[in-house]
């Protein structure tokens, strides 16, 4: 439905931030986020940060999926 | 973190998950004598499934139907025609997303209008259109705003910026679509039957998981929210089959790093501040009550539909069956125009234009037997 | 004259036109006092390669080059990939009234520099001026002449199953540079255009090799579009390995952000060389030992000789078909 790209916040201003996507930088809006800090990863859609990526949940998902992947096949 | 995100595309993990999906699907087939059928509501899922080849390799195990989740594809031709009509006044700058520029209207696309000398511009972000209005105070800037719930908050941000800056030369032509009403239509009309839904990973950032309870409560339909990397779409399919095999009906959030239970409240508040529910015309499906959002009356001065009186004739019908394809009733191959009169270079319907249109996905990635 | 701008008088063939030729073009392109004739007279052998190309680019100056550098390198490359040795170049300029002469000088100087690097001589030129608004700053048309010296033999008809597809470096650099340089999308990136003459690189990699099947420079439309053309023209099916494709991280980042695919982004300093399996190692090593080819990689192979399709093997091991680039690169939301 919509492109969303993970980007790292490298500078934070009032309602905007400079983000880095693998070396390419861009200024995006952050008005939709409650709080965001330098170093956070956000999902960018058409110039706005939509959410902060939760690293713990990312790890948990992968861990759970690895278990599923490694289960014996019937 | 980037390495962590890269893991979601890990080929080895993907292959193992693929094997697990096949295994589970085959159990389902044994039990029910047919393949499980799922619909991906989201165009990015359509593209991800085709691009990774997952749809093709699962062909004998899972039937995947593409739903109405491409905002370009469901945009009524009427709006393209209206934009072109608006552009006839040389004092106006018409801008929109790159996706919309090649969508054919009754008499050509916005790109054709540009070639005729109309001032049509592509912007990356809705906020860029506000900037354009600031930079061109003597001209009228009209932004054609389309999108589902991921994009609607961005339209609200642009409206807020224009409002805060008291811009009098800016307005927006809004034609947006909401997921719930269209999914309800599909589930009630039952033209196409499926056993579960892959729920959009990015729309759900805004909506939140809890918003989907209508699926289970009203229709007994399971759903899984998942992302777009190979492991994520695979886990989405896996979890759907698992629920079916265990006779469970639930909404699972397999995208918790981005999606919370209640969604992005700021985004919801902002869109509700500037926009309200409206009846919306869907390409190929007609008017669906309360299936979109348009600018609230108190911001009517920012509403291009109210600011300018534009009348365009009802678009004439073509043989294009985008409407049926969007609803999942037919596959692109069943449309008489597909890959013949209608190709990405000469698209007749928006499903062939959009990066995530079902026809474009089929044309680009699934046109011929690959491994035969 | 550097702070001045191009006026219509610079194109009328009179005194000012003469001045412009003397002070800008002849100064940069070298001239040893021989009388200026209406045509250049040069010596060539019996088989020559001729290629013409027009250059319109926005912006005219971009990181890693400018319209002049690209006008020379692009034509040199078209000659070089056909297996000929580029010798001479002609250049036609269409200048927009008001164009800064300082900028013209700098463009002409980079053309001279690039020609020197490539070892080609600029032998004929022309300038026209059009009214303000009739051109986007400047357009350049170049024609290249190369000679076949039989040191590089190409045999596209010999393409067969098992042949290797080599790319001389990272893809999409130029395309992303131009998008970034336009400034419309708010991208900030260190990526530079790969714009360069490849004739020396090609010569080092291919000279004396009997297994060179075909060479192409994947400019507009990118790697995928160029390969689809080869597949269709010669009815060969190729399979690319997605994991082998050399793409800079920042190029991938920019593409992800805007919904583009590096496979379809333009290159101006890359060559695709399809070789017999036996020649692969030699060609690859020769490319890699050259500055312009240090990131060269084998990216796939010819898998059959019938259907004429370009296939991409994904990291998951699935395969999908690639087509030509459809439409333009416009930032997408979906």
Image (spheres, rainbow, N blue to C red):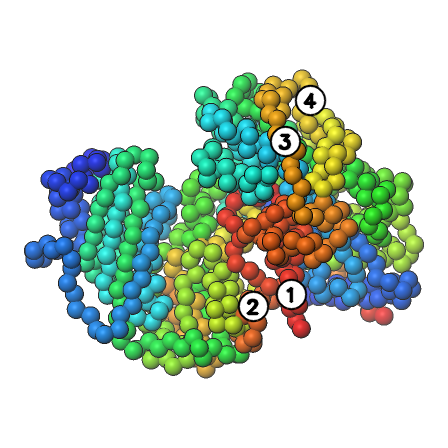
Q: Which of B59 and B14 is in front in this view?
A: B59
Are dots 4 and 3 on a single chain? Answer: yes
Q: Do the residues labelled 2 and 1 touch (CB within 8 Å)?
A: yes
Label 1 element class: loop
Image quadrant for the C terminus of chain B? Answer: bottom right
Q: Circle 4 marks a residue in which chain? A: B
- Residue B66, percent across and down? 73, 51
Q: Can residue B226 be seen in this view?
A: no
- In the picture, the disc for residue C309 is 2
At horizontal 15% and vertical 50% (from top left) the residue drawn is C27
Q: Mark 3 points at which residue?
A: B313
- Residue B202, percent across and down? 69, 43
| Number of numbered labels in the structure image | 4
Compared to residue C210, the image places residue B298 above or below, namely above
> Dot 4: within a 10 Å radius of its alpha carbon, few (fewer than 14), some, or many (20 or more) residues?
some
Q: Name the residue under label 1.
A: B368
Query: Marks 2 and 1, how far apart in space?
Result: 10 Å
At horizontal 75% and vertical 53% (from top left) the residue drawn is B330
């Amino acid at each position: 439905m919509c492109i969303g790209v993970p980007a790292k916040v490298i500078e934070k201003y009032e309602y905007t931030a400079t983000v880095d996507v693998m070396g390419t930088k861009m200024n995006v809006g952050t008005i939709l986020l409650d709080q965001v800090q330098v170093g956070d990863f956000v999902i960018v859609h058409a110039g706005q940060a939509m959410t902060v990526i939760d690293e713990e949940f990312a790890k948990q998902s992968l861990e759970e999926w690895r278990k599923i992947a490694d289960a014996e096949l019937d | 973190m980037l390495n962590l995100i890269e893991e979601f595309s890990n080929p080895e993990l993907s292959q193992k998950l693929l094997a697990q999906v096949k295994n589970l699907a085959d159990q389902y087939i044994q039990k029910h004598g047919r393949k499980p059928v799922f619909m991906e509501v989201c165009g990015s899922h359509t593209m991800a499934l085709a691009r990774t080849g997952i749809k093709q390799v699962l062909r004998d195990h899972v039937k995947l139907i593409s739903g109405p989740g491409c905002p370009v594809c469901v945009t009524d031709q009427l709006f393209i025609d209206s934009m072109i009509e608006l552009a006839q006044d040389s004092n106006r700058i018409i801008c929109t997303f790159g996706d919309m520029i090649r969508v054919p209207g009754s008499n050509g696309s916005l790109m054709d209008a540009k070639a005729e000398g109309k001032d049509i511009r592509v912007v990356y972000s809705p906020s860029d259109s506000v900037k354009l209005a600031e930079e061109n105070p003597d001209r009228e800037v009209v932004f054609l705003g389309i999108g589902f719930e991921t994009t609607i908050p961005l339209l609200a941000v642009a409206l807020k910026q224009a409002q805060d800056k008291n811009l009098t030369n800016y307005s927006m032509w809004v034609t947006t679509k909401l997921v719930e009403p269209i999914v309800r239509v599909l589930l009630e009309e039952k033209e196409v039957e499926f056993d579960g839904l892959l729920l959009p990973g990015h729309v759900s950032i805004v909506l939140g998981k809890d918003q989907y309870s209508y699926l289970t409560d009203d229709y007994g339909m399971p759903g899984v929210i998942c992302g777009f990397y190979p492991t994520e779409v695979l886990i989405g399919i896996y979890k759907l089959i698992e629920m079916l095999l265990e006779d469970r009906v639930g909404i699972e959030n397999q995208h918790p790093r981005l999606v919370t239970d209640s969604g992005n409240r700021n985004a919801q508040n902002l869109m509700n501040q500037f926009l309200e529910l409206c009846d919306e015309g869907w390409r190929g499906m007609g008017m669906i009550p309360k299936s979109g959002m348009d600018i609230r009356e108190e911001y009517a001065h920012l509403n291009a539909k109210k600011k300018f009186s534009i009348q365009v004739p009802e678009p004439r019908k073509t043989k294009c069956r985008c409407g049926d394809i969007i609803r999942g009733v037919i596959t692109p191959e069943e449309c008489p125009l597909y890959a013949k009169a209608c190709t990405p270079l000469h698209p007749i319907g928006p499903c062939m234009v959009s990066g995530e249109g079902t026809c474009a996905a089929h044309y680009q990635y699934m046109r011929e037997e690959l491994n035969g | 004259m550097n702070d001045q701008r191009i006026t219509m008088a610079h194109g009328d063939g009179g005194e000012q036109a003469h001045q412009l030729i003397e002070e800008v073009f002849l100064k940069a392109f070298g001239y040893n006092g021989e009388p200026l004739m209406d045509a250049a007279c040069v010596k060539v052998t019996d088989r020559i390669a001729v290629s013409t190309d027009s250059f319109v680019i926005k912006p005219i100056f971009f990181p890693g080059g400018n319209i002049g550098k690209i006008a020379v390198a692009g034509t040199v490359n078209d000659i070089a990939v056909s297996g000929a040795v580029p010798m001479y170049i002609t250049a036609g300029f269409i200048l927009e009234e008001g164009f800064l002469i300082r900028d013209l000088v700098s463009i002409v100087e980079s053309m001279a520099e690039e020609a020197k690097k490539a070892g080609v001589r600029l032998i004929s030129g022309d300038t026209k001026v059009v009214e303000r608004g009739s051109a986007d700053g400047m357009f350049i048309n170049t024609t290249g002449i190369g000679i076949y010296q039989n040191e590089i033999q190409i045999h596209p008809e010999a393409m067969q199953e098992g042949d290797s597809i080599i790319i001389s470096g990272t893809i999409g650099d130029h395309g992303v540079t131009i998008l970034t340089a336009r400034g419309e999308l708010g991208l900030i990136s260190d990526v530079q255009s790969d714009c360069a003459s490849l004739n020396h690189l090609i010569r080092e990699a291919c000279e004396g090799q009997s297994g060179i099947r075909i060479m192409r420079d994947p400019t507009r439309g990118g790697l995928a579009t160029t390969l689809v053309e080869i597949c269709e023209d010669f009815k060969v099916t190729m399979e690319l390995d997605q994991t082998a494709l050399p793409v800079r991280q920042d190029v991938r980042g920019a593409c992800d952000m805007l919904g583009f695919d590096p496979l379809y982004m333009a290159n101006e300093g890359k060559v695709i060389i399809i070789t017999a399996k036996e020649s692969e190692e030699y060609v690859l090593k020769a490319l890699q030992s050259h500055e312009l080819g240090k990131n060269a990689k084998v990216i796939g192979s010819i898998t059959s000789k019938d259907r004429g399709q370009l296939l991409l093997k994904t990291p998951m091991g699935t395969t999908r078909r690639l087509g030509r680039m459809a439409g333009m690169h416009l930032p997408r939301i979906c």
